[in-house]
Image (cartoon, rainbow, N blue to C red):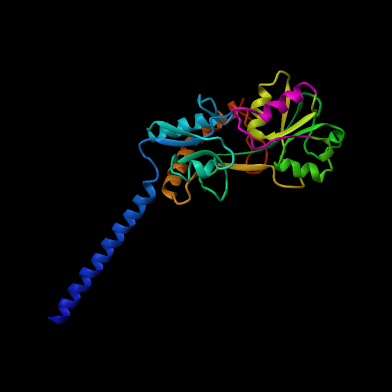
Amino acid sequence: MLWRQLKLFASATTASLILSWAAGGSLAMAQTSELVDRSQLRVCADPSNLPFSNKKGEGFENKIAEIISEELDVPIKYTWFPQSIGFIRQTLDKKRCDIIIGYVATHELVLNSNPYYRTSYVLIHRDGELEGFKSLNDPRIKPMKIGVIAGTPPVSILAENKLLDNIKSFHRMVDRRYYSPAEEMIADISEGRLDIGLLWGPIGGYFAEKADKKLTVVPLIHETVGPRMSYRITFGVRRREKVWKRQLNRIIRRRQDDINKILVEYGVPLIDEAGELIKPAG
């Protein structure tokens, strides 16, 4: 009789532990999931940062957010904050929003989705003036006046090639509501005040297409010294939200062709996994 009572007690205890574990697991998942508002797509974005985003919804990240919204069948709600110092702390970390549409892969401040595009820094020059250009060690650029954003990776390569005396430096951390260094650089190239400019690919490609004069955009994918020039771009979410990340990964897989089409329309140079430029169809 005692043996039977002990057996029943053990079975009940095991069942209780299993139920407790299951409930605890469900609670843990709920605690993770509750940080994401499932009734709307809450996007962290810069209010004035074309070609990426603006309050009018004119950036390519706005358009990609619309794809996610469509897939989830929920409306978009933006939390606007200038993408400078404190952006993540004031938006994603404070749970005011649930996703950053464009973030560099492996960044330690966020949990990254799978990459949905890869791009690089670019060199921009007036059409026909640097035919066949591939690398910043090209001897033709040694006497040229070069525009570059301060503190960006191309500065290191210019230093390696002893070209720092040639540069005009533009501020990197700015409020784009009031000043656009990329647009100023493009204007300087168009008007001959600069011979070439070095910009992050999505920015350079977008503004070069809008310039008054015909400009050529060359991805910096053949550099042999200094830091890497190409980077994979992901969606950024809070670090513990793996369920949310997996849901976004599924959307990327389903809608990659639509995302690529948007990026090409905005002049973003797309790089394949071999590090080569993907030429737009047609």
Name the quadrant of the C terminus. top right
Compared to residue 12, the image places residue 262 above or below, namely above
On the question of residue 11 being in view, the answer is yes
Q: Position of residue 44 (x, y in %)?
A: 49, 37
Q: Which residue lies furthest to the left in this view?
A: 1
Q: Is residue 111 above or below residue 150?
A: below
The image quadrant where one finds the N terminus is bottom left
Q: Which residue is drawn at 36% across and 46% down?
A: 34
| Residue occupying image coordinates x 27% and y 66% | 17
Please state the horizontal and vertical placement of residue 176, each as a whole percent of the image: 61, 30
Where residue 8 sits, quadrant-wise, is bottom left
Judging depth in this view, the residue of 181 and 63 nearest the camera is: 181
Q: Tell me which segment is drawn in magenta.
A: 168-192
Residue occupying the far bottom of the picture: 2
> Residue 181: x percent and y percent?
68, 30
Q: Where is residue 49 in the image (x, y as percent from the top left)?
A: 58, 30
Left/right placement of residue 218 relative to residue 55 reads right
